[in-house]
Amino acid sequence: MGRLAVVVKDTDQFIGWCGLKFDLDQYDIGFRLFREYWNQGFATEAAGRCVEYGFNHLGLSEIIGRARKENKASIRVLEKIGMTFKKTFDFDGQEGVIYFATRLNL
């Protein structure tokens, strides 16, 4: 549990972080990568593995992901790892979205 370093396998280059955390009575998947590593599948691979770990090894029943509504790339990652739109919310004064996955729907 926690945010973990994301590295390129071939070079061990640190490119960002990804992981699960307990926040506001929910388990949340989060990720941040350096811009030069966007759109290469790293966020999807890392987030997907963390969600699998949460369900298969930690026994979690639900994991959520939050993003600002205009952040289409992060929303696409959440969708690619099997998450489904749940609701909108106030994300620091901007419109945000919450996606979720349960152990049963992945």
Image (tube, rainbow, N blue to C red):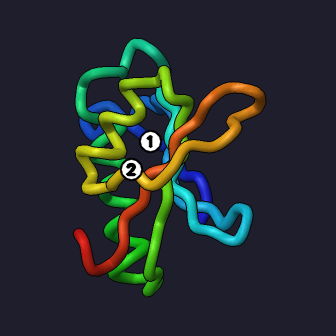
Q: Are marks 2 and 1 in contact (CB under 8 Å)?
A: no
Q: Which mark is residue 34?
A: none
The outermost residue toward the bottom is 59
Q: Is residue 46 above or below residue 13?
A: below
Q: Is residue 85 above or below residue 56?
A: above
The residue singled out by tag 2 in the image is 85
Examine the image and state in which quarter residue 7 appears: top left
Examine the image and state in which quarter residue 6 appears: top left
Residue 4, how many percent across, how many down?
Answer: 54, 52
Examine the image and state in which quarter residue 37 appears: top left
- Secondary structure state at the residue bearing disc 2: strand
Q: Which mark is residue 6?
A: 1
Sequence-earlier tag: 2 or 1: 1
Residue 16, how many percent across, how many down?
Answer: 51, 33
On screen, residue 10 versus residue 12, left or right, reads: left
On screen, residue 6 versus residue 103, left or right, reads: right
- Residue in view at x 27 percent, y 80 percent: 104
Visible in this render: residue 103?
A: yes
In whole angstroms, how far apart are the C-alphas of marks 2 and 1?
Answer: 26 Å
Q: Is residue 24 above or below residue 67?
A: below
- Secondary structure state at the residue bearing disc 1: strand
Q: Nearer the viewer, mark 2 or mark 1?
A: 2
Residue 88, how many percent across, how many down?
Answer: 55, 43
On screen, residue 71 versus residue 105, left or right, reads: right
Looking at the rendered structure, the kind of residue marked 1 is Val
Looking at the rendered structure, the kind of residue marked 2 is Phe
The N terminus lies in which quarter of the figure?
Answer: bottom right
Count residues near mark 1 (Cα–Cα under 10 Å), then give few for <14, some for 14-19, many for 20+: many
Residue 10, how many percent across, how many down?
Answer: 25, 35
